[in-house]
Each structure stands twice: as structure tokens, then as C-alpha cells.
Amino acid sequence: MDRSIKQVAIIGGGIMGCAVAYYLRRLGIAVTVFERGEIGAEQSSRALGYVRCQGRHRAELPLSVLANRMWETLPAELQADVEYVRQGNLVVAETAADEERLRKSCEAARANGLSTRAVDRAEIARISPKLHGPWRSGIFTEEDGHASPTKATQAFAAAARRLGADVRTHAGVRGIAVSGGRAAGLWTADGVFAADAVVCVAGISTNFFLRPLGVALPIQVVRSSNLETVAKEPFTRTGVWTPYISMRPRLDGSFAFGTGYRGSPPDHDLGAATVGSLGYFLPRYVRNPRRPRLRLNRDFADSIQRYFSMTASAAPMPDPVINEPQIAERLVWAQKFFPHLVPLEAARSWACRIDVTPDLVPAIGPWGPPGLFTAVGFCAHGLALAPIVGKTLAELIATGSSEVDLRALRPGRFRESDPQEDPVAL
Ligand SMILES: Cc1cc2nc3c(=O)[nH]c(=O)nc-3n(C[C@H](O)[C@H](O)[C@H](O)COP(=O)(O)OP(=O)(O)OC[C@H]3O[C@@H](n4cnc5c(N)ncnc54)[C@H](O)[C@@H]3O)c2cc1C
């Protein structure tokens, strides 16, 4: 144990910030979380809710597998109902190219100890009897599941508080204080909050803190629009991924529908950060068949203001614009693939900004001046990974080493080479 670490300050009260706080408290370290809005106000309350290993990037799979195991006991440990269900995840293939991709994904999953298996049409019909469509085959992972992102985030925050963490809301941070070459605390509206270590888990805003220290990471922000339906007679608890939409059945009989593995692309709102890391993103953008659609909207002015003023960026973000045509399109696909649900209405739709790295896996670990740690760029996988990331970062901070090897996900990889996406990842 590093006895010099007595107080840790965390920027961001999303699921990562709350999970790190919880595991730090379990190690007996004093911790204060600063959240500019409400707990889980951004990605962590807007995720779809899959807790899945299936189809993950090879660099992320080992961590996903460990996280999945932790989810089994998480509700009991956090003393909270987080709507966690482990009834498998089914991915279906429409074309020969899809089948080839799923076959490789299945191989990678099995190499990491998962039970993922190829399924034929008959088995697809058995696993998801109400699913219609021209599916040639698929893959199925028994140990995958789903949970409520909002409840899971709140559960980590509540458990951290029960153990004595100071979790502050409406407490925007303006910068990281550095003293003697070390991260020494945070700049807040009340001055400097002193700490022995700082964890920057500010999601899409992480670079606002890293840039002044000269250690910005290549992060771009995409926007995804999703919907939840009205409740129907519950008929399944298994998550289903088609090429066009994904479907998470909620316990009350409603469904969350998001994009499929080659569905309509996300949006990218042009803003001050668009030009950051263009060297990484432009070549990928050009060759990406699902390249984000560039949008110019009210986010532009807001991003400029936040880019130049840390006080402005310490205020909660406005809700992102919802892509209504995309919502309508998802509802059409949903009724096509689950015809017994017709007529199906959206009860709620929402949009969310997502932090994305060039290789589509997160950057996790120490970064920048000694005493600073980050976990960012979860590319819409962070709910599932939160327990293992929280535990591993807490261990690293407290002891200087961790049981889990984070080398493949180290933040420095972008400077050392040109990291590549895994073409098999879904
Ligand atoms: C549409 C969608 C679907 C997704 N689906 C899944 C899924 O099915 N499975 C899965 O595993 N993951 C999914 N994800 C991803 C998952 O939601 C995220 O990876 C995860 O929530 C990231 O958590 P975080 O704590 O890093 O970020 P966030 O939840 O974004 O938290 C960062 C926090 O930092 C705060 N902050 C920023 N700046 C400041 C400041 N100056 N001062 C104080 N606080 C600040 C923000 O207000 C925010 O609350 C999805 C995400 C989206 C958007």
C-alpha cells in the first residue's frame, strides 16, 4: 500500500467515477467525487444497458470477461437492484460477410474462455422465438446479460457514500492543480481542493483537463439517438443484436432499441474539439463505411465557449439534439423484426454524446504528471466494464500495481504507434 495516498479527488460522477470511489473506499482511502451535474447525468444514465463480452475488441476482451464475472455478485455487493439479468446475448448474421465476422468473433470469445457458440436458424428460433428476419446463422453467449445503467451508477454512488466517500453533485471542476510536477488536487469554484492523487474520468470532457497539461488524448465525440418503447407483455430476457438494430428487453416489458452492428451511423456534432487529433481520425473517417454524419447545430457555439473557458466547461452540458429520423427508422426495424409487437410506440427517446478513441477501446491507467490517472474513450462499452475498471484503478492508485494487466489499454499507446481497430469487434 502506498501510504502517501491519503486523499483522492475524482473528476466525474458517471459510473467510472462512482466505481473508482467505491473500490478506493474499500481499500480505506479517503475519496471525494466532483460531478458538475447529477450522478450519471451523461453517458451513464443514457446507455442501452448491455453487459456483454460477445463481439468485444481483442484488446478489451480479457477485461470484459473479468467484468462479467464481477457483475454476477455486484447487486448483492452493492445492496441494490440494478435490474441485472444474465440470459445471454444473441447476434444474428444476414449475409455471408456477417457470418464470417461472427465466426471470427466467436473464435476470439472462446479463446478468452467464453461459452460463445455458433447457432443455426433452428437454434435462433429456439433462443428468440419471436424474432423474424432473413438470418442465416448467429452466435450466442450464455453468460452475457444486461442491466439498468442508471440504477447501476446510482448503486455505486450509494455504496461509495455508505463507505464514507464524499460524492458531490453540482460541483464543477475547472482544472487539475499540479505542484512540484505532481497532480496535487483540483481547481474548483472554492479554490484548490488538495489531493494526493487525481482521477480524471470526465467522459467526453476529459480532454478539457488533459489538454492544459499537454497530455490530451485522441478522443472524438459521436452522438447516438435511441428509444425505449411502451411496455408490452414480456416475452424474452435475452438481448438481440441484428445488423440494423439491437434490442434490450427491460424487466417491465418495454424495450430499449439502439443501433445494430452495421446500422445507420452515429452523428458527429461539429465543434471546437473536432479538429483535435485529426491526424488519427481523418484517415479512419475517410475509409469508414459507417462514418459519422457531420452535423452543425447548437452544440457548435457551446463547444467553443467550453473550449476556451474552464468555468464554462464546469457547468452541466445541455441535452444533445435527438436524431428523430433515426428514432423513426429504429421503430420501423423493431416492428419488422418483432412483428408481434406491432403497433409499437416509443415511450421515450434520447440522445447521448459518446467518447470514442481511434482503435475503439478505452485508455486506462496513469497518465501525465505522477499522481494523475484516467479512464476514458469507452466507445459505448463502459457500463459493462465499470466494475473491473473501478477496482483496477483503485488498486493501481493504492498500491502502484494491479492484478489486471492494463498494458493493451494504456493511454500512451497512441503516442507510441498507430493503434488499429479490431475488424472482428461488433
Ligand atoms: C447510447 C449509449 C449506449 C450505450 N450502451 C452501452 C451498453 O449497452 N453497454 C455498455 O457497457 N456501455 C454502453 N454505453 C457506454 C457507457 O454508457 C459509458 O461508457 C459509460 O457510462 C462511461 O462512464 P463514464 O463515467 O466514463 O462517463 P460519463 O457517464 O459520461 O461520466 C462523466 C461525468 O463527468 C462529469 N464531468 C465532466 N466535466 C466535468 C467537470 N468539469 N466537473 C465535474 N464533472 C464533470 C460529467 O457531467 C459526467 O457525469 C453506452 C453509451 C451510450 C451513450
Image: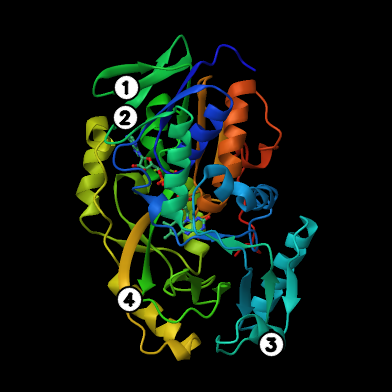
Amino acid on which disc 3 is placed: Arg
Residue under numbered circle 3: 121
Closer to viewer: mark 1 or mark 3: 3
- Please state if 113 lies on the left or on the right of 204 as rendered: right
**Residue drawn at the location 53% of the way across and 54% of the way down:** 381
Image coordinates for residue 241, horizontal then vertical, percent: 56, 73
Quarter of the view holding residue 130: bottom right
Q: Quadrant of the N terminus?
A: top right
Disc 2 residue type (three-letter): Val
SS state under label 4? strand
Q: Secondary structure at mark 1?
A: strand
Assign a secondary structure to mark 2. Answer: strand
Q: Is residue 55 visible?
A: yes
How many numbered markers are drawn?
Answer: 4
Query: Ligand 1: does it lie within 8 Å of the C-beta at label 1?
Result: no
Residue placed under numbered mark 2 in the picture:
173
Label 3's element? helix
- Determine which of the numbered discs, if any, sits on residue 187 in the image: 1
